[in-house]
Structure formats: structure tokens, C-alpha cells
Image (spheres, rainbow, N blue to C red):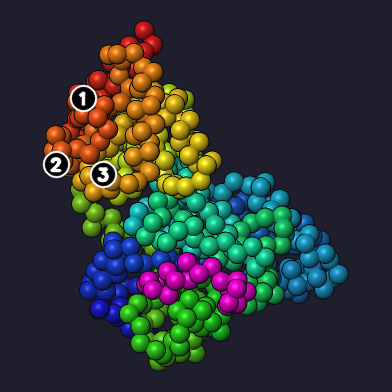
């Protein structure tokens, strides 16, 4: 495997081969971005400022902390230590921070939006507690809907990835050092950081699925504010082995201060030889975004229109929705189908969580099929192979409902997304009596959209 080049300097020294390697890894979903506070510059009444510097000043005012004599720029740790030194109640600081953030609305910074646009990133780890990364992902990928899964770690509540990363079907944002709350469950001070780092290294308090991914993937630590020893400790914790041991994956530090720490840079170059350091977090993101965007293939021009944007289905099915039933492996084609139907003005729904188990889940699916407007089973080479799967139960529920529907009335609209022969389709007998429409890759032909429109019009006539 080609390594990223060793250099101490700006990202301009990142040569073409190195960018090509990194982008290849990203496209193969073998890179995890770890986001730090250097990327969080927000527009305030005093111009563009680091969010956590602004928060420190606001918190000091709320807690009546005298900042005279404190180092500048002010940090949340400075404020917390001074407040505790005045015999303040520790828990009060966290609820005040939450109130401060609730009273303002910041636009997600450009750098976060650029990272969110790199859709090959399906797992983001953040060392900050604010909601700006979540907002950027939902804005850029989901039209502002709260569709991303947000997971937060704390020592008293160990939350891990819900499934292995390869099975994730929603973008995940993992708050490694806690998430904004009225409770003291996130890192504000250096003391909090110690508690979290100790817990994360504990045998019984480690989120195993997450740390498996950190160990076996390339890492981009963008905008971190780790001090010398904390940076070393974090890498050792993520990689779960001596940093001088051979490993097949690399790490990149892209921030505004690591290069200024000569001892840390020397340690990384001499001991952790797969770790590289580049200056300027926002500049790194801008260059990465520009290069990734240029590598994306232009959309097919056959239809003469721009590609449809996929918006994930809501967790609960809307009224009169078209229910799409599919095998997990066919999700990309189903996303294409949903995007096209949404663009045509139809309301669609499919189960994105694919929990496949439990009475409550089964009742939910059964009830949704009982009240959906139309049922679209997606037939493919995958469904041919899988003779036992949950989608077959969905098909059975649709057959049961069809028995109560008048002859000639349309409820089931089977489609085939590949070259599976219609005569050989492994489907219920009642489906075989219906016309199975060809829809390669999930792209619905105009006649399917016209037929749906006619069916809806007839229903409401």
C-alpha cells in the first residue's frame, strides 16, 4: 500500500500521488474524518470568531467569572477552573452552556458543509459537543431534515455504533467526547478530558465497534486542538498498538497548531511514521473538497435534467405513501427510485433501518402495508438468491391485503431493476399475474410515472 508522503509544511507539499492515494481511499470508504474545533468559526456580533472562544466569554459572563488576569484568548477550561476555584457548582456550567447555544442560531461553517458534501464519508467522529456538524450533514445531504444518526459517548453511558460500519444505512455522527446537554456528560474542561480518556481506554467502557473502525481505517484529524501528549495518547488509543509498530493505514493531522510544536512533529516523524502533519485545517478541507468534486463523474445527460437528490425516508410512513419493498443489497437502486418518485411529486416510503426482528417492528411494517397507497416490490438477482428474508414477509402481507381489494383495482406494482427474467422471478403467484416493469438501476421510465399519476387521479376522482 502506498503511504502518504512525509512532509512538514503546508498542504501545497501534498503531491499529486498523495492526493490520488487519499482520494482513492476515501472513495473506497476507508477514511474516517475526525473533526475538531479549529473548523468551527462562526459569525458573531464581533465578526467571524472561533465558536469555543466565543462560548468561553459568554459562559464567563453567565457564571460571573472575573476574567481579568486569565490567559487570552479565553478557553472553556480557563472559565471552568476559575469558576470551581470560586466554589461554584460544577453542574451549573453545563446547563448554562446549553442555554447559551439554544439562544443563538449559527450557520454551519463552510468547511463543515464542504466535508458533508463528500458523500463517501459515511461516518464522522467529532471531538466537539456542538450540533454544527450534524446541521451541516443534514443540510447538505438531507435537505435540512434530521436524517443523520447522532451518537454520543459518555463514561456513564457507553453508546456504540448500532451495526458494523459496512452495514450503516444512514450517515453517522459520533460525538466521542460527549454532546451538548444540561447534564455534565461532555468535555468542557481538562478534568473532563481526563475522565473521558481514562474511560475510553477502559476494557468495559470502550465503544468496540467504533474503535475497531478507528484501528483499521485511515484517519483524517482535521482541526483538532490536542496538546502534545494528548495527540500522542489519542493516536495510541485509536490504533491499539505501539505507534512504532508496522501498520497498513495512515493518519493525517491537518490543523493550525501541530506544526508549531517541534517536539510533537519530531515524535510523529520518527516514531509514528505513518502519521503526517499538514498546516491549516480550513485550507486542507477546501483542497480536499475541490479535488474530490472534480473526480466525480458528470451526471448522465440522457434525460437532459440534473440528477435527482435522494432524501432519506422519514422514520414514520406518511399517509398515502407508496411502500417500496426491497432486499438490503439493492438499496442504491431503491434510493434512485425514491429520488425520482419524490421529484415527480409522489410520496414514497421504505424502511431504511432494516431492523429485521421483534414484534414491534413487525407490527409497524404490517400496519404500513395495510395503509399505504400502493405497494412496489423490487425484484432483482438478489431477491432471486434470497429465498428467506424479511422482504418476503412484506410481500406476503401485500398479498394478504390484495385479497380484500376488488378485481381490477391496482395495489401491487412490481418492478425489476436488472435483467432477471420475468418468467423465472421467485415471487408470489399473484405477482406473476401482473406486469413486471423493467427499471434498470431503479430509474423509472416516464410511462411508470404517468401510470402512477393516473392511478392516484382515479383514486381521488
Point out the image quarter for the N terminus: bottom left
- Would you say residue 216 sits in the magenta stretch? yes
Mark closest to the chain's N terminus, 2 or 3: 3
> Which is more toward the observer, 86 or 4?
4
Instruction: Residue at 51%, 46% (x, y): give it.
Output: 358
- Would you say residue 229 sits in the magenta stretch? no
Q: Which mark is residue 383?
A: 3
Query: Pointer 1: residues within 10 angstroms few (<14), some, or many (20+)?
Result: few
Instruction: Residue at 21%, 24% (x, y): give it.
Output: 433
Inter-mark Cα distance, 2 to 3? 12 Å
Instruction: Residue at 21%, 29% (x, y): give it.
Output: 432
Mark closest to the chain's N terminus, 1 or 3: 3
Instruction: Residue at 24%, 54% (x, y): give it.
Output: 296
Label 2: which secondary element: loop
- Percent across and percent down for residue 141 are 40, 46
Inter-mark Cα distance, 1 to 3? 18 Å
Q: Which mark is residue 433?
A: 1
Q: Mark 3 and mark 1 in contact (Cβ < 8 Å)?
A: no
Query: Pointer 3: residues within 10 angstroms few (<14), some, or many (20+)?
Result: many
Q: Is 330 positioned to the left or the right of 176 in the image?
A: left
Q: Mark 3 and mark 2 in contact (Cβ < 8 Å)?
A: no
Quarter-wise, where is residue 444 in the image?
A: top left
Mark closest to the chain's N terminus, 1 or 2: 2
Q: Would you place residue 305 above or below residue 214 in this image?
A: above
- Percent across and percent down for residue 167 are 38, 56
Q: Which mark is residue 419?
A: 2
Whether residue 380 is visible: yes
Label 1: which secondary element: loop
Q: Which residues are magenta?
A: 199-219
Give the foreground label among 2 and 3: 3
- Percent across and percent down for residue 387 are 28, 46
Amino acid at each position: 500500500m502506498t503511504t502518504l508522503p512525509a512532509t512538514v509544511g503546508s498542504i501545497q507539499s501534498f503531491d499529486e500521488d498523495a492526493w490520488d492515494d487519499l482520494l482513492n481511499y476515501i472513495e473506497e470508504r476507508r477514511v474516517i474524518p475526525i473533526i475538531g474545533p479549529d473548523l468551527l468559526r462562526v459569525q458573531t456580533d464581533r465578526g467571524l470568531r472561533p465558536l469555543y472562544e466565543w462560548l468561553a466569554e459568554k459562559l464567563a459572563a453567565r457564571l460571573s467569572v472575573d476574567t481579568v488576569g486569565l490567559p487570552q484568548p479565553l478557553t472553556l477550561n480557563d472559565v471552568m477552573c476559575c469558576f470551581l476555584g470560586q466554589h461554584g457548582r460544577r453542574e451549573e456550567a453545563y446547563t448554562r452552556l446549553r442555554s447559551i447555544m439554544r439562544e443563538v442560531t449559527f450557520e454551519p461553517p463552510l468547511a463543515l458543509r464542504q466535508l458533508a458534501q463528500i458523500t463517501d464519508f459515511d461516518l464522522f467522529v467529532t471531538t466537539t459537543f456542538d450540533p454544527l456538524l450534524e446541521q451541516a450533514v443534514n443540510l447538505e445531504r438531507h435537505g435540512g431534515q434530521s436524517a443523520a444518526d447522532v451518537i454520543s459517548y459518555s463514561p456513564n453511558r457507553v453508546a456504540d455504533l448500532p451495526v458494523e460500519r459496512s452495514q450503516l444505512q444512514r450517515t453517522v455522527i459520533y460525538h466521542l467526547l460527549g454532546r451538548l446537554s444540561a447534564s455534565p456528560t461532555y468535555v468542557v474542561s481538562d478534568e473532563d478530558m481526563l475522565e473521558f480518556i481514562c474511560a475510553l481506554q477502559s476494557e468495559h467502557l470502550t465503544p468496540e465497534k467504533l474503535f475497531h473502525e478507528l484501528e483499521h481505517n485511515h484517519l483524517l484529524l482535521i482541526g483538532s486542538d490536542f496538546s502534545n501528549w494528548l495527540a500522542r495518547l489519542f493516536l495510541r488509543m485509536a490504533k491499539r498498538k505501539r505507534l512504532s509498530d508496522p501498520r497498513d493505514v495512515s493518519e493525517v493531522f491537518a490543523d493550525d497548531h501541530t506544526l508549531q510544536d517541534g517536539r510533537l512533529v519530531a515524535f510523529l516523524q520518527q516514531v509514528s511514521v505513518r502519521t503526517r502533519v499538514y498546516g491549516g485545517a480550513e485550507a486542507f478541507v477546501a483542497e480536499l473538497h475541490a479535488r474530490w468534486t472534480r473526480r466525480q463523474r458528470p451526471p448522465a445527460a440522457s434525460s437532459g435534467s440534473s440528477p435527482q437528490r435522494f432524501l432519506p425516508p422519514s422514520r414514520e410512513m406518511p399517509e398515502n405513501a407508496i411502500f417500496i419493498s426491497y432486499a438490503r443489497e439493492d438499496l442504491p437502486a431503491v434510493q434512485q427510485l425514491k429520488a425520482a418518485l419524490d421529484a415527480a411529486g409522489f410520496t414514497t416510503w421504505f424502511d431504511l433501518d432494516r431492523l429485521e426482528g421483534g414484534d414491534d417492528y413487525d407490527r409497524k411494517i404490517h400496519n404500513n402495508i395495510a395503509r399505504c397507497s400502493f405497494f412496489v416490490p423490487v425484484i432483482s438477482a438478489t431477491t432471486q438468491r434470497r429465498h428467506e428474508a424479511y422482504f418476503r414477509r412484506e410481500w406476503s402481507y401485500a398479498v394478504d391485503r390484495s385479497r380484500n381489494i376488488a378485481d381490477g383495482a391496482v395495489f401491487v406494482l412490481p418492478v425489476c431493476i436488472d435483467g432477471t427474467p420475468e418468467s423465472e422471478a421467485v415471487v408470489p403467484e399473484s405477482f406473476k399475474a401482473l406486469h413486471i416493469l423493467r427499471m434498470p438501476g431503479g430509474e423509472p421510465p416516464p410511462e411508470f410515472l404517468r401510470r402512477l399519476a393516473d392511478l392516484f387521479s382515479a383514486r381521488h376522482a
